[in-house]
């Protein structure tokens, strides 16, 4: 099981619970869409899954590890070894090239470096394959990311998240800056990469039209009652 949540509650100190999720399970290779209005706890859920914050109550298990039972260093290592994250603002390093940005996960994680070598021969070979899959292969890999368009930067961020074949990719509003055609094409690529590598995906979005593309949907309502899980 990649994700297992049980009686999960999260609240900011001194405030009413923002998240209440009775149960949620996501298996290897499955995808989860997380929707809800602003302030409903979507980003907080991603922070819980990535171990940046801990539950107020209940259990949050990711890849068989209870986040509350891990030390901060162990949570950092789990995140580096087993999770790819597509940030809403991409968080690329502007002074590095496309290639150097994409290779960062395999430079900080021996596990992901080894997995990249085992499956692709060398991390550079995997990176080039991702560039081709994401339509970036016409650009020199040495191109500084600050010279790329927003859409190109977004695809570099996705390539970086999938480097080293992480078990889980978390994406925070990755389609928010795209028009309808580019949004659909991007989602096709994201889920296609996940399927090819048996990677689980959790994606947050305000766009309800995307939800049916995912194996499961989770709709958050914020501090009022609780989260509603809608099975696929």
Image (tube, rainbow, N blue to C red):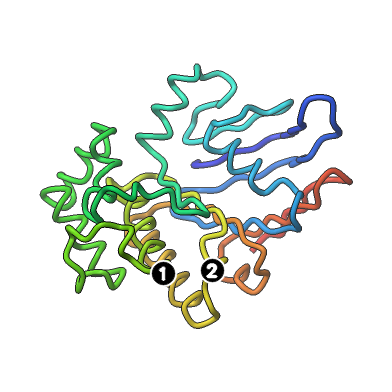
The secondary element bearing badge 2 is classed as loop
| Front in this rendered view, residue 64 or 141 | 141
Q: Quadrant of residue 32?
A: bottom right
Q: Is residue 43 left or right of residue 130?
A: right
Q: Residue placed at 41% from the left, 62% from the top?
A: 154
Question: For the residue carrying disc 2, how many other residues have a C-alpha within 10 Å: few (<14), some (14-19), or many (20+)?
Answer: some
Image quarter of the C terminus: bottom right
Residue 180 position, x and y percent, is: 55, 80
| Front in this rendered view, residue 129 or 180 | 180
In the depicted structure, whether residue 144 falls above or below residue 55: below
Q: Looking at the rendered structure, which numbered label has been put on residue 179?
A: none
Q: Earlier in the sequence, mark 2 or mark 1?
A: 1
Q: Is residue 207 left or right of residue 200?
A: right
- Of all residues, the one furthest to the right in this rendering is 224
Q: Residue placed at 41% from the left, 30% from the top?
A: 78
Q: Quadrant of residue 83?
A: top left
| Front in this rendered view, residue 63 or 45 | 45
Q: Residue placed at 42% from the left, 66% from the top?
A: 150
Q: Residue placed at 55% from the left, 41% from the top?
A: 3
Q: Looking at the rendered structure, which numbered label has been put on residue 151?
A: 1
Residue 195 position, x and y percent, is: 38, 62
The secondary element bearing badge 1 is classed as helix
Instruction: Check disc 2 and report the residue beneath it.
Output: 177
Q: Are marks 2 and 1 in contact (CB under 8 Å)?
A: yes
Question: For the residue carrying disc 1, how many other residues have a C-alpha within 10 Å: few (<14), some (14-19), or many (20+)?
Answer: some
Residue 191 position, x and y percent, is: 44, 65
Q: Is residue 30 left or right of residue 19?
A: left
| Front in this rendered view, residue 31 or 182 | 182
Residue 15 position, x and y percent, is: 84, 31
In the depicted structure, whether residue 216 falls above or below residue 116: below
- Of all residues, the one furthest to the left in this rendering is 121
Q: In 3D space, how far apart are the residues under numbered discs 2 and 1 (Cα atoms)?
A: 8 Å
């Amino acid at each position: 099981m990649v994700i297992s949540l049980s009686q999960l509650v999260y609240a900011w100190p001194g405030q009413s619970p923002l998240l209440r999720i009775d149960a949620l399970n996501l298996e290897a290779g499955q995808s989860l869409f997380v929707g809800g209005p602003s302030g409903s706890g979507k980003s907080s859920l991603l922070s819980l899954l990535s171990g940046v914050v801990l539950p107020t109550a209940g259990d949050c298990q990711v890849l068989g590890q209870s986040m509350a039972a891990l030390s901060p260093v162990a949570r950092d290592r789990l995140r580096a070894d087993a999770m790819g994250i597509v940030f809403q603002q991409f968080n690329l390093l502007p002074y590095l090239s496309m290639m150097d940005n994409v290779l960062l996960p395999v430079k900080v994680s021996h596990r992901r470096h080894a997995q990249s070598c085992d499956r692709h021969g060398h991390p550079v070979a995997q990176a080039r394959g991702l560039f081709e899959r994401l339509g970036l292969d016409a650009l020199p890999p040495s191109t500084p990311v600050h010279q790329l368009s927003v859409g190109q930067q977004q695809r570099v961020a996705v390539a970086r998240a999938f480097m080293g074949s992480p078990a889980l990719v978390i994406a925070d509003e990755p389609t928010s800056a795209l028009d309808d055609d580019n949004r659909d094409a991007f989602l096709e690529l994201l889920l296609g990469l996940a399927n090819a590598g048996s990677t689980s995906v959790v994606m947050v979005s305000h766009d309800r039209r995307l939800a049916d593309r995912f194996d499961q949907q989770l709709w958050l309502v914020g501090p009022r009652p609780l989260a509603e899980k809608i099975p696929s």
